[in-house]
Amino acid sequence: MSVVALLSVAPVIEDSMANEVAAAVEALEAFDVAYETNPMGTIIEADDIDTLLAAVGAAHNAVDADRVSTFLKIDDKRTRKQRAREKVESVERELGRTAKRER
């Protein structure tokens, strides 16, 4: 099994969220997950849903704020393992180029 998720955890505040987002990302280190942070969230990969959800819970709880907003989108591939990078590579094969453009 392979579970890939998009996670966004942020305090609901007016000022910079970077410190609290960093705390959420750091909390993932305690779990057997791979992750990559981008401007809109963090992609997390785990071998099973229980590991993924435990990591997400820790990331959510790591944010020290009166109000925390968490968005989670899960792709639980139950028939075979597929890493997040493989999903991007499939799109790139169809495009015939990398799926990235710099401005």
Image: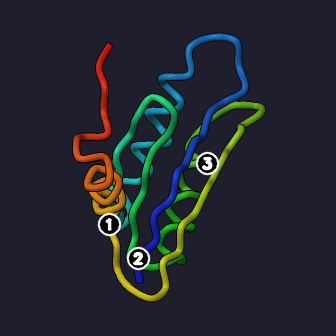
Q: Which mark is residue 66?
A: none
Marks 2/1 in contact by CB < 8 Å: the verdict is yes
**Residue 18 or 39: which is nearer the viewer?**
39
Query: x and y percent of residue 40 in the render?
Result: 51, 33
Query: x and y percent of residue 90 in the render?
Result: 31, 60
Look at label 1 and name its amino acid: Arg
Label 3 sits on residue: 60
Q: Is 61 located above or below residue 19 in the figure?
A: below
Q: Which mark is residue 83?
A: 1
Q: Residue shown at 56%/14% (left/top)?
A: 16
Query: x and y percent of residue 2 in the render?
Result: 41, 76
N-terminal label among 1 and 3: 3
Q: Residue shown at 40%/70% (left/top)?
A: 46
**In the picture, which quadrant includes the C terminus?**
top left
Horizontal side of residue 81 vs 24, given as left or right: left
Q: Which mark is residue 2?
A: 2
Report which quarter residue 89 is drawn in.
bottom left
* Spatial CA span between label 1 and label 3: 23 Å
N-terminal label among 2 and 3: 2
Q: Residue shown at 22%/42% (left/top)?
A: 97
N-terminal label among 2 and 1: 2
Callout 2: SS: strand
Look at label 3 and name its amino acid: His
Horizontal side of residue 99 vs 41, given as left or right: left
**In the picture, which quadrant includes the N terminus?**
bottom left
Colour pattern of the rendering:
rainbow
